[in-house]
Image (cartoon, grey):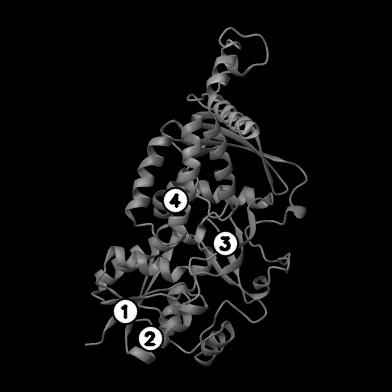
Amino acid sequence: MTKKIVLAYSGGLDTSIIIPWLKENFGYDVVAMTADLGQGEELDAVREKALKSGASKVYIEDVREEFLTDYVFPTLRAGAVYEGKYLLGTSMARPLIAKKLVEAAHREGAGAVAHGATGKGNDQVRFEVSVKALDPGLEVIAPWRLWDIRSREEAIGYAEARGIPVPVTKERPYSMDRNIWHLSHEGGGLEDPGNEAPDDICIMVTPPERAPDEPLYLDLGFEAGTPVTINGVRLDPVALVERLNAVAGANGVGIVDMVENRLVGMKSRGVYETPGGTVLFYALRELERLTLDRLTQHFKEGAAGKYAELLYDGLWFSPLREALDAFMTVVSRTVTGRVRVKMYKGNIATAGVWSAHSLYVKDLATFERDEMYNQNDAAGFINLFGLPLKVRALVEKAAGKGKAEG
């Protein structure tokens, strides 16, 4: 009986050539599994292409709402941003794809799964660590670590020799990953951090200099740290993010160009488009400034960094990430309210924040005369707060005097 393997199939360059390679080199019956994460028109020809490439069966599952509800929004609520810039669009998708890959393997009775991540990237770790967490008995095949193809050009040549069309050309050699949350670009001229990204690289976001000359205002509503409304209209997660992608992208918001530290030890340069996500991260942070006390807000900022690192490193299914999620859920119970943002040529500004849980008390913060705050109380507080520094200075002064007398 022919062995079955389930391939995480995107229809891109790498997975396009993996189907015939697995058949030619291992004799596998290849089942293709595609998770619809919001790739849009990229999925139009996926089924036909996979079958023509040699797959015996194709699964295409719409997981956009699951992706946003169970992965993106918890990450947003946590405020997790990798190295201060990357909003983790690819990182968040990989554990969900791995989950669907394992489920398909169980349905098909397959003993192995495969992916198209390269031996230099983070995704190989994310896929394989997630599979180990979900079903340690499954074998994982990673062709990029096994075959003799060593470049994008060789991969394109392999595909052309077998009549497989690929979306990557030698004229536009970018490796792109798209979902409802973001679009990433790597490779080609971007590999030199001294090169400015070309004007035509962005697809989701209008270059700021070509954005409208008038600002756009939006009201965003949150409940317990989760976005639920735009301009007072309640939307489901998919509709909400798609709407924000459209309006934020049109106003030039959401382009990140960065050199990042990969988990495998090297630095890489990428251009990320995350229009709706950029607005949501900004707005939620502004709401937290109003509703979280100082100690909690500062501690959450540190925990958010760890959350981002865990997610970037592929450890979504780890006990620590689950524990941090429990913390973020409790912290966000009062993060409910409305934020008005102003977008203009790639910039975001705050135009108002409101919450029934606001800790901002005008009578305390005012510079006018007030009855709630006795300014004389500050003297005693400062004396106690500065006592350790005062004691240290006195001790050092006494030690210095003793040396002088000696």
Neighbor class of circle 2 (other Cα within 10 Å; few <14, some 14-19, many 20+) is some
Q: The residue tagged with tag 2: helix, strand or loop?
A: helix
Q: Is residue 226 visible?
A: no
Quadrant, the N terminus = bottom left
- Spatial distance from mark 4 to mark 2, Cα to Cα? 36 Å
**Mark 4 — residue?**
307
Give the number of the mark in front: 4 or 1: 4
- Spatial distance from mark 3 to mark 1, Cα to Cα? 28 Å
Give the number of the mark in front: 4 or 2: 4
Quadrant, the C terminus = top right
Give the side of residue 367 with respect to residue 63, left or right. Answer: right
Give the side of residue 144 with respect to residue 273, left or right. Answer: left
Closest to the observer: 142 or 254?
Answer: 142
Q: Earlier in the sequence, mark 3 or mark 4?
A: 3
Q: Tell me residue 378's x, y (percent).
A: 58, 16
Q: Tell me residue 32's x, y (percent).
A: 38, 75
